[in-house]
């Protein structure tokens, strides 16, 4: 039986609930969030439980050794958490080049930065949770100890990673990856049980210590020992110095709503910049090639500037405020004509991932995202712990004149972004689309689908997507209307139809009716997505 064969079109319906809802990319993880809600936890507790479980049941996209961001709505106020980690103190441009690299490698010991995920859980639990961190991690520990059967899309990407890694991960430092994720000398199959006792033990230590064991205790020592043995840069001093940062979210207005993102070093503002440019161009039309052309052009201009300028805010050559200003949007909108542009960065004024959304009956809501980047991350696993370390440092530049140039203690340009929507000071709800550089493009399309086309949350996610790939190249899903793709080609876009939807992101949405409190959720049809509602 082929669990990836779907010869007939399928439809999901919007899911409704009142007491609570958790939407994410894996059914077991969504159910753990609901379990915590029924146990007396709130939406934040549910999100932590779901996120921890996702490190076990979807290791192809995230892990304990990754980064996280969150937007949290509590008592009428939106809070932002940046739990991305900086580069180690010993990681310099000179040190990387001394190892023979002319650009940052994508795997191995070099691109590993300080993980922020355990700190994110601890911060969220301490500030907003009703249950202890140890209680919220119990379901994840259970799945790691007892095992679970692989879901279809999980199995697909696990096998793809294994097939690639067995050819390239030949050095000794990669042995623990195969011991952990290919214990029988192969990737586990769809429907086959897999467990990770070391992962369970690590989660228990994190829960019992409010994450201190990871940054200062036994787990920090194991990470340091492994890095020292194999010539890595991340050390226990880097871990001990780390603290997640509470930040003020940034917003832009679109169709009477506020679209919220985390400020740089994240790329969320790219979606806001694109929305600002697009709204300068007139009213959008449904399934219209000119509207799609304008959307793509708005996104490519915003993204070109985002990649040129976004990094740690202190290192940006232009402020976030300017890039979100009407003047910036108007100047970029003037460049959009009838033909596809080959974009260049804005002239400065003088002077991978898993996503989840959760909500409860009290009105608390959270938009949360965490990632190891590029699937399994660096490919480095600390033996016996289940800790797969991220490769987030791969996005650093080795050009010392670039805004995102590598330097010790710096956070890189970051792809993972949670989104949130409000209207007139009231929460509409959390939304997100994971998938590396697809993420702001997914945010943009979800917002347009929701506010311009008034699609329900499930339909807003199901609508066939486009993805700007660079230059004039645009990828579209197989279900994308052919007549629109042809007209885009006539406008100069280099359109590529993709048979596999895996690169177009995977998202979730929860909207709350402000009058009734009823929750309406949509989840991703491109993955093993599920919604658990109460």
Image (tube, grey):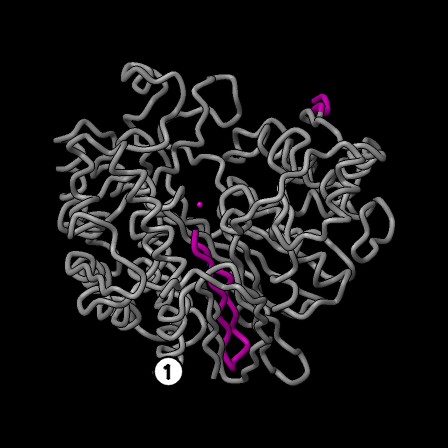
Q: In which quadrant of the rendered view does residue 44 lie?
A: bottom left
Asked whether, in this view, residue 447 is left or right of residue 45, the answer is right
Q: In which quadrant of the rendered view does residue 16 lie?
A: bottom right
Residue at 43%, 60% (x, y): give it.
Answer: 4
Q: Is residue 263 visible?
A: no
Asked whether, in this view, residue 312 is left or right of residue 385, the answer is right
Residue segment shown in magenta: 347-369
Circle 1: element type: loop
Residue at 32%, 49% (x, y): give it.
Answer: 159
Magenta stretch: residue 349 in it?
yes
Residue at 47%, 84% (x, y): give it.
Answer: 534
Q: Residue furthest right?
A: 282
The image shows residue 470, relative to residue 178, as above or below, that is above
The tally of labels here is 1
The image shows residue 291, relative to residue 194, as above or below, that is above
Give x and y (percent) for residue 529.
Answer: 46, 66
Residue at 45%, 49% (x, y): give it.
Answer: 82
Asked whether, in this view, residue 484 is left or right of residue 35, the answer is right
Image quarter of the N terminus: bottom left
The residue pinned by badge 1 equals: 40
Q: Is residue 371 visible?
A: yes
Magenta stretch: residue 237 in it?
no
């Amino acid at each position: 039986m082929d669990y990836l064969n779907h010869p007939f079109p399928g439809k999901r319906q919007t899911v409704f609930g009142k007491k609570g809802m958790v939407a994410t990319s894996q059914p077991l993880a969504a159910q753990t969030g609901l379990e915590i809600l029924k146990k007396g936890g709130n939406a934040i507790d549910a999100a932590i439980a779901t996120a921890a479980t996702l490190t076990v049941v979807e290791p192809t996209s995230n892990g304990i050794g990754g980064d996280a961001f969150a937007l949290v709505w509590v008592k009428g106020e939106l809070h932002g958490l940046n739990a991305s980690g900086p580069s180690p103190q010993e990681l310099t441009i000179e040190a990387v080049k001394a190892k023979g690299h002319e650009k940052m490698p994508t795997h191995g010991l070099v691109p590993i930065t300080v993980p922020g995920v355990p700190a994110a859980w601890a911060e969220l639990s301490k500030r907003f949770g009703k249950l202890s961190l140890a209680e919220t991690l119990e379901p994840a520990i259970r799945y790691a100890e007892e095992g679970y059967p692989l879901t279809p899309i999980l199995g697909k990407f696990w096998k793809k990673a294994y097939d690639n890694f067995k050819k390239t991960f030949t050095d000794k430092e990669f042995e623990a990856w195969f011991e952990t994720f290919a214990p029988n000398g192969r990737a586990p199959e769809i429907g086959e049980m897999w467990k990770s006792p070391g992962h369970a033990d690590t989660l228990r230590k994190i829960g019992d210590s409010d994450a201190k064991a990871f940054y200062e205790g036994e787990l920090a020592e194991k990470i340091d020992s492994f890095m020292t043995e194999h010539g890595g840069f991340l050390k226990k001093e880097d871990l001990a110095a780390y603290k997640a940062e509470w930040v003020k979210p940034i917003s832009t207005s679109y169709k009477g709503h506020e679209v919220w993102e985390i400020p740089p070093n994240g790329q969320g503002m790219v979606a806001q910049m694109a929305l600002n440019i697009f709204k300068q161009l007139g009213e959008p039309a449904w399934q219209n090639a000119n509207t799609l052309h304008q959307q793509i052009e708005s996104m490519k201009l915003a993204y070109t500037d985002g990649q040129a300028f976004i990094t740690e805010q202190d290192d940006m050559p232009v402020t976030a405020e300017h890039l979100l200003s009407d003047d910036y949007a108007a100047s970029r909108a003037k460049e959009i004509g009838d033909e596809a542009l080959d974009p260049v960065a804005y002239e400065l004024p003088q002077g991978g991932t898993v996503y989840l959304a959760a909500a409860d009956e009290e009105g608390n809501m959270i938009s949360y995202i965490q990632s190891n980047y590029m699937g399994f991350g660096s490919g480095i696993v600390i033996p016996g712990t289940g800790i797969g370390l991220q490769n987030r440092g791969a996005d650093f530049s080795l050009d010392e004149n670039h805004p995102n140039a590598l330097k010790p203690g710096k956070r890189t340009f970051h792809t993972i972004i949670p989104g949130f929507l409000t209207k007139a000071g009231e929460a509409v709800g959390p939304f997100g689309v994971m998938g590396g550089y697809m993420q702001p493009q997914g945010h943009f399309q979800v917002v347009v689908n929701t506010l311009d086309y008034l699609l329900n949350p499930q339909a807003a996610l199901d609508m066939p997507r486009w993805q700007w790939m660079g230059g004039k190249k645009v990828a579209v899903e197989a279900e994308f209307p052919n007549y629109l793709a042809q007209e885009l080609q006539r406008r100069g876009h280099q359109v590529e139809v993709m048979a596999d939807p895996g690169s177009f992101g995977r998202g979730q949405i929860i909207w709350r009716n402000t009058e009734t409190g009823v929750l309406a959720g949509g989840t991703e049809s491109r993955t093993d997505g599920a919604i658990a509602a109460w």
